Image (spheres, coloured by chain):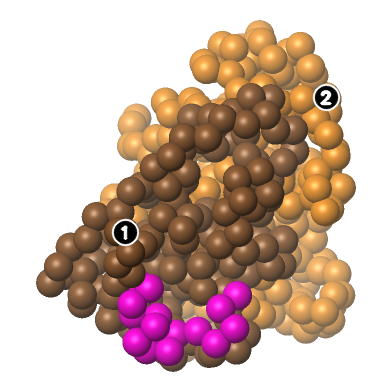
Amino acid sequence: MKISVTVNGKRYERDVEPRTLLAYFLRESLGLTGTHVGCDTSSCGVCVVVLDGEKAVKSCTMLAVMADGHEIMTIEGLVQGGVLHPLQQGFWDQHGLQCGYCTPGMMMTSWVLLKQNPNPSEAEIREGLSGNLCRCTGYQNIVKAVEQAAAAMQSQPVETVA
Amino acid sequence: MFPAPFDYHRPGSLDETLVLLAQYGGDARVLAGGQSLIPAMRFRLARPAVLVDINQLDELAYVREADGMLAIGALARDAALERSSLIESSYPLLFDTSAVVADPVVRQMGTVVGSLCHNDPSGDWSVTALASRAQIVVRGSTGTRVVPIDEFLVDSFSTAVAEGEIALEVRFPSPPPRTSGSYQKIERKVGDFATSAAAAQITLGDDGTVAQIGIAIGAAGPTATRVADAESALRGIKPTKDAIRAAADAARKIADPVADPRGSVEFKKDMAGVLVGRALLAAFERLGVGGLR
């Protein structure tokens, strides 16, 4: 089936099998390997991408054909003109990652969280990220990274492509 | 693992959806949020030959009150309830439930009606739907019918939706004054299936007696289960510690869980009672009735 999906502001037309999962479409058809695949069963959240600028979705549990005509933002869409997004800067500054495997999903989930709630409490960040698993850094610095990003975005709003 | 191959259709209207469902009958499954169906297909627990994707039918994405009912359309996501001030202020049982279904990311895609249609024995919405006496609007090419939740939940992963039909909407009766409720769930981690769950909804009469009551348990049988004996223990009386204890015991008695890594049968039966007790206490306390602990 022919689909047309806008990813990080760029439109892609591809022919896919209906059973192709969005995560694999992004990684294998488009070469956007920033989106990771972890548990592959909708439990870990490393594959989260943003759908239509408003929903964080687990791309291992969405068919690529469901994204036909829609806009997806992946981790590759965060950086603008070589400048890190406040979330990326926050994860860097606060040591919010060690191995980095969960990081794209953490950031994309946080992106939607901050869009809906620009000034979340620590508890709201922890609740918002409770569908995303980290197995090495631990959550303390991830929460700090999101807090830093929230503060930075409050003082200087950023635009992203999605 | 990838789903087995299937044919994919994305109708642009409800009429077109019904034509496709009539055409493909039992070979077709409706795809809404996909948060249960897609994993089931990946594990090959489900192998539909045809998927009818209704995600384009934005007109089904409503949550609205009308004619004494809260109507939730087939494409309303769990997250829409969690963020609704109407649900937060007027439907405490639904608000409780919406905050603990799966995890916050899954809730952005998952739908209430889809969860009811999936009818997982450990699902959350079916428990809440029983306690609040919901109805499901089911449409086929020959017409529309309204199915009470007790008849809708036929068996594990099986509902009253027949071949060629689609569940369009779930309706929750708008709570009368002095109504409250509570949803209680034990899970090993966020996003895991419930180890045990219970829902209660209570309406008090002017004299402080229980006028209406709904109590149900989850992860305790082939489907969510109404605990009629627990409802009887409280209906028509002013709540007492003993009556709540009797309701909890009724839940322990009727619970029919399976042993799995989440717990033994004995443990889960006991938890069904504990959670019914907690749900009732929370509901009464929200109504300002204390002294029951």
Residue A12, x across and y down, in percent:
52, 35
Point 33% across, 48% down: residue: A161
Q: Looking at the picture, does residue B288 appear above or below residue B64? A: below
Point 73% across, 13% down: residue: B22
Residue B123, x across and y down, in percent:
66, 57
From the image, tell me which residue sits under label 1: A80
Closer to us: B289 or B276: B276
Q: Looking at the picture, does residue B285 appear above or below residue B62? A: below
From the image, tell me which residue sits under label 2: B26
Q: Which residues are magenta?
A: A87-101
Q: Residue A113 is drawn in which quadrant?
A: bottom left
**Three-letter amino acid code at the position of disc 1:** Gln
Helix, strand or loop status at disc 1: loop
- Chain B rendered in what hue? orange
Label 1 CA crowd tier, 10 Å (few <14, some 14–19, many 20+): few
In the rendered structure, the residue with mark 1 lies on which chain?
A
Q: Please say if the residues under marks 2 and 1 sit with CB atoms less than 8 Å apart.
A: no
